[in-house]
Image (tube, grey):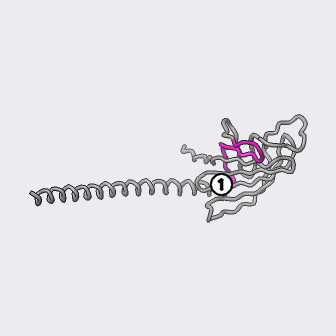
């Protein structure tokens, strides 16, 4: 009787171990497949971003804003963008913060409609991102803004704007890459 109980217990234990190892192997296979698909998608996006940076043609859709000082971060809804086409800048971004100069008859928004820029660009392979630095004129106020832009291989971006007349402000967003049209 003891032998049959021991055999039965051993059979149950061994079948449980076999089942657990089989389930673990399946999860490992699925994880590998998901990981390979993600790496392939990320590498395609990285190539598209590299091409976009070489052509100096991209558009960033702003999703969050982080004002400095005592202002809270905000999620953005609506059409807030920062676009560069052949080194010509167009942008419309909200501003939250303190302005140390009264701009007569103008909004505090950051706007540019066709200003030419000459960015200094580097690729940081450790961070896997492009770093761009340039100045541009804010059309409504005439002030010069300094821009520091990071565009990561994943498509995420961070734009920091500073001015002598305003507090620093940072925008986060996603780069939008236009797909080539098949005609």
- Name the one closer to the observer, 8 or 82: 8
- Name the one closer to the observer, 138 or 32: 32
**Per the image, is 163 magenta?**
no
Describe residue 6's horizontal placement relative to residue 107 as left or right.
left
Element on which disc 1 rests: strand
Quick one: which residue is furthest to the front in this view?
2
**Image quarter in which the N terminus is found:** bottom left
Magenta stretch in the rendered image = 54-73
Describe residue 52's horizontal placement relative to residue 33 as left or right.
right
**Image quarter in which the C terminus is found:** top right
Q: Where in the figure is residue 175, as x and y percent of width and height?
A: 63, 48
Q: Where in the figure is residue 128, as x and y percent of width and height?
A: 61, 61
Quick one: which residue is furthest to the left in this view?
1
For the point 71% across and 46% down, which residue is it? 66
Q: Where in the figure is residue 153, as x and y percent of width and height?
A: 60, 56
Quick one: which residue is furthest to the bottom in this view?
126
Q: Where in the figure is residue 132, as x and y percent of width and height?
A: 72, 57
Q: Which residue is mark 1?
A: 151
In the rendered image, the vertical position of residue 106 relative to residue 42, given as above or below = above
């Amino acid at each position: 009787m003891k032998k049959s109980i021991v055999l039965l217990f051993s059979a149950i234990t061994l079948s449980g171990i076999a089942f657990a190892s089989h389930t673990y192997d399946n999860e490992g296979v699925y994880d590998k497949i998901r990981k390979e698909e993600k790496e392939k998608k990320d590498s395609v996006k990285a190539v598209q971003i590299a091409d976009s940076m070489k052509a100096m043609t991209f558009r960033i859709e702003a999703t969050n804003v982080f004002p400095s000082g005592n202002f809270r971060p905000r999620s953005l809804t609506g059409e807030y963008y920062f676009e560069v086409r052949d080194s010509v800048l167009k942008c419309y971004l909200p501003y939250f913060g303190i302005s140390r100069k009264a701009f007569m008859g103008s909004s505090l928004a950051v706007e540019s409609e066709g200003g030419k820029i000459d960015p200094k660009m580097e690729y940081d392979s450790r961070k896997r991102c492009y770093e761009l630095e340039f100045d541009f004129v804010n059309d409504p106020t005439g002030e010069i803004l300094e821009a520091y832009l990071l565009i990561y291989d994943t498509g995420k971006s961070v734009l920091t704007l500073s001015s002598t007349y305003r507090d620093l402000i940072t925008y986060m967003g996603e780069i939008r890459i236009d797909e080539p049209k098949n005609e």
